[in-house]
Every structure is written in structure tokens, then in C-alpha cells.
Image (spheres, helix red, strand yellow):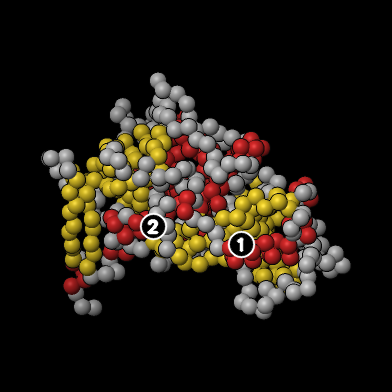
Amino acid sequence: MTVSVVPSVSISSFLRQTRNARTFPITLIRCSSSKSSTMEEHPKRVVVCGGGVIGVCTAYFLAKRGAAVTLVEKSAVACAASGKAGGFLALDWCDSGALSSLARASFDLHRSLAQELDGPQSYGYRPLTTLGLSIAETESQATPSASVSKPSSVPNWVDGPVRSPKTIGTPDTTAQVHPQLFTRTLISKAVENYGAEVVIGKLESVEVEEGRVKSVALEGGRVIESDAVVLALGPWSCKLELLSSIFRVHGLKAHSIVLEPKNPDAITPHALFLTYHPSQRGKPLDPEVYPRPTGEVYLCGMSAEEEVPDDPEQIVGNPEAIKVLKRVAKTVSSQLGEGEAEVKAEQACFLPCTDDSVPVIGEVPGIRGCYVATGHSCWGILNGPATGAAMAELVLDGRASIVDLTVFSPARFVGRSRRGKFCLYQNATTSATLLMEFHFEWFMSSFIV
């Protein structure tokens, strides 16, 4: 039996290890362990492509159910949005749309996972109060004025010129996790407890034989045989023609900074959703502020659609956007201004968005055993657990029971155009990989309504 696994870490050890390092170290070696009794003697081989929160949650629940899971990630687990997001969770903020049942199920799953995996210590899970505030920046205001009166509902550390405070979330309805710690804790447990394997490599193609997935091919020639493949590629879904021929996923570049104030104990667990009025009288901005139990404070905002680079390591923040976030921090609290808080990170990431603002979760039309889970936008950390649990049910049982996936099916995009195009990668008898493209006409599109 080969041992060694992705190590789980506590919040304090995470801070020590990342103080002078860009990425968290991971040991990637297969570890055998007992499988769940729900699987047959020969467990289903599933390759999950993508090491973000959606792919990791899918791998976790598949492995827990007894599948033989291989997670393929190009760079490092949680190296992109899943490591640079805010980690905000909300029970009912998606109630007015298609994500309602998914979000509610996932919020509850976050609670269960926190109990199961010691979330408060392992990855900073905690309920918190969430406030909506309006705040205006002024040209002359170098630091917030202590003389500005404020409502009692606003915590003391928020000493800027805030107006119109409103409680928009309570500890019963809003919570948070440290997203990188959460994602890496789950993959660690999947490897340690359920025998999952993590492979660092770039996906080249999905190989299909007679309409069913057969394997995935990686850059460099490695081929991983599989009974099922889950494509959880986030904004990089647009780089795989098999998916981009059916639907569009575009990247929304979001910026963030992470600060470490001199007096972290003074920062209470209040998430802030701001309406921020710049001093130049420009368009109001909507930055967000999340204190973390690590003692850090995370601020994000300044988003725009941009081309997604091939390598997540190439993503850097726009200096002007970072500068604005620093001004926001200083205006919100004197404890977050220059000289009072150390800047731990200036960063950016790409959020995967679909044209109809609804995630894509389900089996890829025309390819049995090939599944996709992407397009979660800013709600990826929230909806990761329920998406992963539903994907595990879909792959292993043929249907999801935790949430109805009908509204998320990729088939919804196929019917919107008269002509679709799939790219299937099929192994020939000569072992060469042939690209086969076929076009199909949907029967109903030939009728005039």
C-alpha cells in the first residue's frame, strides 16, 4: 500500500505555512482505503477534471460513496477562484431564482460538513451577521473621523462615514468559510479516508467510443481509463471544445485584497455589503468586506469580463482596481488603512458565468458517462457541496435526489440553436486519437410554430 496524502491543516498552521509562500504544499500520492458498501466489488472509475471547489466537492462525495476517483488538476488544488474567493454563504439569497433549492441544500450541507470535519478549526467555518451599508469617500478624508456618529448596529471597528445600515443576514442565514482551506480540507479527506487520487496534469481530450466516455488524455501522453468523467473546469470550460460547442462560459475577473490588521481581535464577525460612493462622484461601487477568524480581513469588488488566460498562475490584478479596494478599506475602518494593516495579498480570479446566469450541471448531451458542472459565478463556494453531492448521485445512481438538476441541464443550450456541434474524441484500433465532429439537427426545430 502506498501512503502519504494531501495534509489537512488548521487555520493557524495555514497562516504560518503561507506567510512566505504563494501556494500551499500538497503531496499527491495514491492511498488505498476501504470503500463504501454502496459500491460493487469493482468500483466505478470516475475522473474528475478540475481542482476547484466544484470538482473537489464532486470528488469528495463520489469517493465517500465508494467510487474510484482520480482528480485531475492542471496547477494546484484551489489555486484560482476557489482559493481567492470570499467564502460567503447565504441560506436564502438565491430564493427568487433557479438556484433556490441548490443554495438551500448546499447551505445545510456546509453546516453538516463543518460538524463532520471540524470546520471551525479546519477551515474557519462560522455563522456571522451580515450588514448592508452606504458609505461615501471624500477627497479630504485621509482616515475616518472618530466624531462621526453611527447607529448601534454598526460594529465599533467600522468607524467610517456609514449611512443607512441594515441587517441583511443573521447567524442563522449567513456564514463563511476560508475557501482555500475548505477546498483543500475536503480533498485531503477524500484522499486519506476514501482512497481518492490527485494528478497534476493538463487535460488534452475526452476520449469516446461508441457514444460512451472511455478515458481522458493528458498532456504528455498519459491516458486515464474511466467509466465516467466529470468536467468541473470553471472558467476554463471555454477552452474545451467539447463544452464550448454546446454552451458559452465566460470569465468575470474579480479583484480582492487580504489585510492583516494590527489588532485583529477588535474586528468582529460582521460581513459588510457596501454601496460605496467614490469621491470623484462616479458610479457607486459594490465592494464586500469579510473579516475572517484567521485575523485577516478580505475585501473584494471591481469586476469586469475579460479573456481567461490558459494558466491560472498568469492571473494578476489590475493595479487601479487594487488601489480602489485599498481606498475602500481605509474609508470603512481606520484599522484597515495604510500603516494599521499589512497587505497580505493583492489578487484577482475569474468567476465562471453562463449566458443565462444559471450553472450547468448534468450529463453532456450525446456522450454517455460524460458530465459537466460549471458556471456557478460568485456562488461557487456556497453551492459546491450540493453540486458535488448531486453529481455523485447522478454518476452513481443515474439521478440526483438532493436537488432536482433539470433546470441546470446542459441540454437546455442545445435546443436554442438549429444546428449544434459536438466534438468527440475516440480511440482508434491503432491507438491514435481521432477527432470526430458530427452535426445534428433537432427534430422539433424543423417545425414552424
Kindly identify which residue carries mark 2. Answer: 360
Q: Residue at 62% x, 56% y: name it.
A: 257
- Is 365 above or below relative to 147? above
* Residue 359, quarter of picture: bottom left
Quadrant in which the N terminus appears = top left
Q: Earlier in the sequence, mark 1 or mark 2?
A: 1
Q: Residue at 23% x, 55% y: name it.
A: 423
Q: Which mark is residue 88?
A: none
- Is 165 above or below relative to 378? below
Q: Residue at 14% x, 43% y: name it.
A: 428
Return the residue nearer the eye: 70 or 16: 16
- Measuring from the top left, give residue 324's x and y in whole percent: 64, 66
Q: Is residue 341 left or right of residue 86?
A: right
- Measuring from the top left, give residue 349's x and y in whole percent: 51, 56
- Measuring from the top left, give residue 409's x and y in whole percent: 35, 57
Return the residue nearer the eye: 47 or 427: 427
Q: Is residue 36 left or right of residue 145?
A: left
Q: Which mark is residue 322?
A: 1
